[in-house]
Amino acid sequence: MTRTVDLNADMGESFGTWSLGDDAGLLDIVTSANIACGFHAGDPDVMAATMKNAVAKDVGIGAHPGFPDLQGFGRRRMSVPNETLGNMVRYQLGAAQAMARAAGGEVRHLKLHGALANMASEDLAMARTCYQAALSVDPQIIVMVLAGTAQQQAAQELGCNTACEIFADRAYNDDATLVDRRLSGAVIHDPGEAARRMVEMVQEKAIVTASGKRIPARIDTICLHGDTPEALAIAAAVRNALLGSGVRLAKANGAVL
Amino acid sequence: MTRTVDLNADMGESFGTWSLGDDAGLLDIVTSANIACGFHAGDPDVMAATMKNAVAKDVGIGAHPGFPDLQGFGRRRMSVPNETLGNMVRYQLGAAQAMARAAGGEVRHLKLHGALANMASEDLAMARTCYQAALSVDPQIIVMVLAGTAQQQAAQELGCNTACEIFADRAYNDDATLVDRRLSGAVIHDPGEAARRMVEMVQEKAIVTASGKRIPARIDTICLHGDTPEALAIAAAVRNALLGSGVRLAKANGAVL
Amino acid sequence: MTRTVDLNADMGESFGTWSLGDDAGLLDIVTSANIACGFHAGDPDVMAATMKNAVAKDVGIGAHPGFPDLQGFGRRRMSVPNETLGNMVRYQLGAAQAMARAAGGEVRHLKLHGALANMASEDLAMARTCYQAALSVDPQIIVMVLAGTAQQQAAQELGCNTACEIFADRAYNDDATLVDRRLSGAVIHDPGEAARRMVEMVQEKAIVTASGKRIPARIDTICLHGDTPEALAIAAAVRNALLGSGVRLAKANGAVL
Amino acid sequence: MTRTVDLNADMGESFGTWSLGDDAGLLDIVTSANIACGFHAGDPDVMAATMKNAVAKDVGIGAHPGFPDLQGFGRRRMSVPNETLGNMVRYQLGAAQAMARAAGGEVRHLKLHGALANMASEDLAMARTCYQAALSVDPQIIVMVLAGTAQQQAAQELGCNTACEIFADRAYNDDATLVDRRLSGAVIHDPGEAARRMVEMVQEKAIVTASGKRIPARIDTICLHGDTPEALAIAAAVRNALLGSGVRLAKANGAVL
């Protein structure tokens, strides 16, 4: 049976006069785009242009909500009551849906951004709040979760459409957490190595840790980056290696876990 | 044949810790609420609470987009390219739709706010841009227009569901424009007078000007205010007088003009 | 020897069209005003008006910087690198200085707001960063600190002009921390009680805890509130009781601790 | 007698994670930097870094206030009451002064940005409001004005320190206004041509128009750009040609006109 996997990347992270990332390059590689919703990056014009390009390339559109913090790019943790968090997610998702509809597309999935994602991967109640909020707007939405974290657990408990994600360029510890960025080898810089690992993990249906351990895992989608030339080279290498090994690339459909 | 008219008011204009207006009082009077969408007032929490209250009172929900200008409350004119304007409207409408859906309701109509509304009542291309943007998100949405302005003309040309609006507390010139606020008599402060005028206009299907002239006009909805005790008294008086004269009050359905 | 104490309160917390607090009432009671600097509340117009009124009443002007979070009123904790924190403090202090100068006054003191103040009262490095930043702009500025917290320690280590503050309406634990707001008796609602406590503490040069324990403390200034009618009544009662007991009220001068 | 002229350029226009312009390249060319103050671009960190670099290169620091419009980069016209405009200028100038002081420098001049500058070059009352506001904060500040516009007239009437500016890369009409950008030849793309024109104008103390007419003018400073490789090449060519023709380059001192 052919394995199928989704490739996703963050996009639409420009703002006003300021450009960021190589969205055009990424759109030729990925099958799903996580599009910033204006709180940490993106503005209505950037969203409109990004949605239009995604529709033209038949790339799946995702809402990528974050904290309301342009200066910090949504990477600074904020203590926000859960009810407010839920409303922030609803608001951003709705804005993304409207922009997608006007571009002839639709929002298929939701992925949390930055500090909001990091906090939700550690805090079950917070992850549940965010996903419930998204489901209150669209009960069919595919929730994209970091495999093996509280994000996955929350989606599982909610019984919603879920797609589990691994990173192409990050090494894993034996408990499925990411190796601390400050340690050597935490970030993979070699396109060939990243590509080999991804083929291995997708085929073995397991996270392969830095020590070589296999942790069985659902792998629905692989997170790629495009913010540096190196990142784009890794993204292209992963794509080509997967296709070369007989893996099919397609927008994640999600499944109830 | 019973005449039917809608009563609308701006709502959800608080922001964070700052309260504004008597939304609870207005929700017992109006049949439609124009809810701020976060650009000039409102935030996701305020929107959620306002939507919930509107649903509970069976008041029709409208998106009330404005310029991105919290300090100026959307009342300062801005020169924004039309494409950007359209995207601003789409974004705010989508956010409102999501908040409404999560509250068990739906956005039925759209009404422009403040300087955006003023500019669009004078500038046909701008009005058309805003309404086309809204229709690209929801082709069935009811566009609420200032009767006799470029807003109405734009909606007419677009052939969309339209509801024409008059003001309860403003005197009209003989060309259907509003009497300049700086002139005496421009703003009606007496609840009884406001109420009598509204009954007269609705029954005669005409704008009655300050000089007594009748200008035949579609009157689908009456704009009320609730930001002062006096405004709320006028709103209540208009409601009671209309009901007392046999006029039926209901959410505007709009019609293709 | 006559005891002298300063009375301070937060002010200028309106924003755009939204009003907050009874600044006019407070300006007749306090000797120092902590004026919001536009990040969590206040805008340049509100600042200008508040500075002007403070100058007219000969009330000491303080900069009251907070996190950049209007929706959360600066009450939501944010993880911000210390260098960024320092620059936020410099920026807001500078803005306040300019507004004060244009109003014919000057910024005499600095007091941190909301979550920034709470975090700095627990985190010595953060308090030091904020105060060093203020001193890099004005080496003579009086730093207003929560007595007995990391704020006081940081100011002490920096050897800067410092004014130590207690709360008029909050009960203290035996370790000089505040009684948790969720416990009964944590907040004092009775003007008479608040007034008696303040006279007692100022005269005994000690924090009197809920259990009756005396903790010797520098008391340079007392924090009052004006956001409710009750708060304003407490403020007035404290002022009158202090004057009645022979205490002199004057802007804090600060001292090197 | 040696002619002396200042070279100025906009700087510090990055924001958060988003970079813009080649500030390092420009700092080796110009003698004065117009530093964004956080309303249309720049944030406290960007300001701190830019101030520090300007101090290190002995480049004169200027505050460069704009409209509060990050998405529009301060290029969208806004209708703001004059009192509010003045307070916006005061606030931004004060913030810049604090950042400069902390970096070991000082704000020497003020130059309006974008739409605010365009409007003030046409509207004498608006220009006067902005400059009076700056002078209320620092009576000695050098106001940098577009030569021959309402900006210059306002500064003249106020009797303040003034530096008159021409553009290196824009063609002039015979009435000293700029040739409309939509016309061919309006923008000069050739470094050699830009350099020759600047030497000519500085030596002749006149604006040389597209038709060859000479309009006698004070020329204290030349505006350069650094947002494209071409712009930086023009900037370098102008600098080198001026130095080669015996013109001295130095921070503008301003003069009462």
Image (tube, coloured by chain):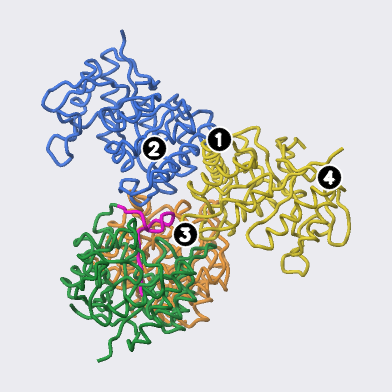
Chain colours: A yellow, B blue, C orange, D green
Report which residue position mark 1 lands on: A104
Task: Identify the chain of the residue marked 4, using the numbered disc in the image.
Answer: A
Task: Identify the chain of the residue marked 3, using the numbered disc in the image.
Answer: C
Q: Quadrant of the C terminus of chain B?
A: top left
Quarter-of-image position of residue C1: bottom left
The dominant secondary structure in magenta is loop
Q: Is residue B35 above or below residue A125?
A: above
Q: Which residues are magenta?
A: D62-78
The Cα–Cα distance between marks 2 and 1, rounded to whole angstroms, is 18 Å
State the SS at label 3.
loop
Indicate the position of residue A36 as horizontal and vertical percent values: 57, 49
Indicate the position of residue C102 as horizontal and vertical percent values: 26, 69
Residue C133 vs residue C122, the one in the foreground? C133
Report which residue position mark 4 lands on: A246
The Cα–Cα distance between marks 3 and 2, rounded to whole angstroms, is 34 Å
- Amino acid type of disc 3? Pro
Q: Nearer the viewer, mark 3 or mark 4?
A: 4
State the SS at label 1.
loop
Indicate the position of residue A172 as horizontal and vertical percent values: 80, 58
